[in-house]
Amino acid sequence: MKASGDPGRQIGTTRSAKEIAEEISEHSDVLARATQQAAKALGLFEGANAAMKAARKLDVPFDHPVRDYADEALWMEA
């Protein structure tokens, strides 16, 4: 049985953290926009703080746009 979102993936298979991180970095523009939307929805500080926590948990690289947006928002609130 295959997962509906990815025709090549089998349900029940696992991916390594590295594979997930690589996929995240491939979609940096989507993540950057999501970070901006979270900041707007939750309030600038709360949204930026949540984005930074998620970035740390996912080991997103320091030069990733998600971290840039969140860091900028945190500095604006300080």
Image (cartoon, helix red, strand yellow):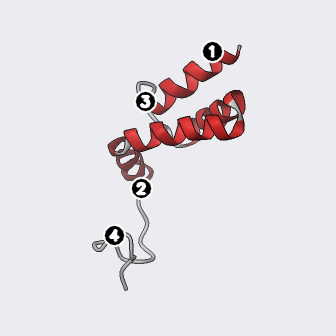
- The residue type indicated by label 2 comes to Ser
Q: Helix or strand or loop: what does disc 2 sit on? A: loop
Q: Which residue is mark 3?
A: 65
Q: Furthest-bottom residue in view?
A: 1
- Which one is nearer the viewer's eye here, 29 or 10? 29
Of callouts 1 and 3, the N-terminal one: 3
For marks 2 and 1, give the one nearer the viewer.
1
Mark number, residue 11: none
For the residues marked 3 and 2, what is the alpha-carbon distance in whole angstroms? Answer: 22 Å
- Could you tell me how far apart the alpha carbons at marks 1 and 3 are, in whole angstroms? 15 Å
Tell me the amino acid under the disc marked 1: Trp
Residue in the picture at 48% in, 33% down:
66
Q: Earlier in the sequence, mark 3 or mark 2?
A: 2
Expressed as whole percent of the image width and height from the top left, the position of residue 16 reads 42, 55
Q: What is the C-alpha distance between the residues marked 3 and 4? A: 25 Å
Numbered tag placed on residue 16 in the rendering = 2
Q: What residue sits 60% from the left and 22% below the top?
A: 73
Counting residues from the start of the chain, the first of labels 2 and 4 encountered is 4
Q: Quadrant of the C terminus?
A: top right
Query: Cα distance, mark 2 to mark 4?
Result: 17 Å
Q: State the CA–CA distance, disc 1 to disc 4.
A: 38 Å
Name the N-terminal-most of marks 2 and 1: 2
Q: Residues within 10 Å of mark 1 (few under 14, many from 20)?
A: few
User: Can you say whether 38 is above or below 10 in the image?
Assistant: above
Amino acid type at mark 3: Pro
Report the residue marked by disc 4.
6
Give x and y (percent) for residue 23: 36, 49
Task: Between label 3 and label 2, give the one nearer the viewer.
Answer: 3
Q: Is residue 53 visible?
A: no
* Local secondary structure at mark 3: helix
Residue at numbered disc 1: 75
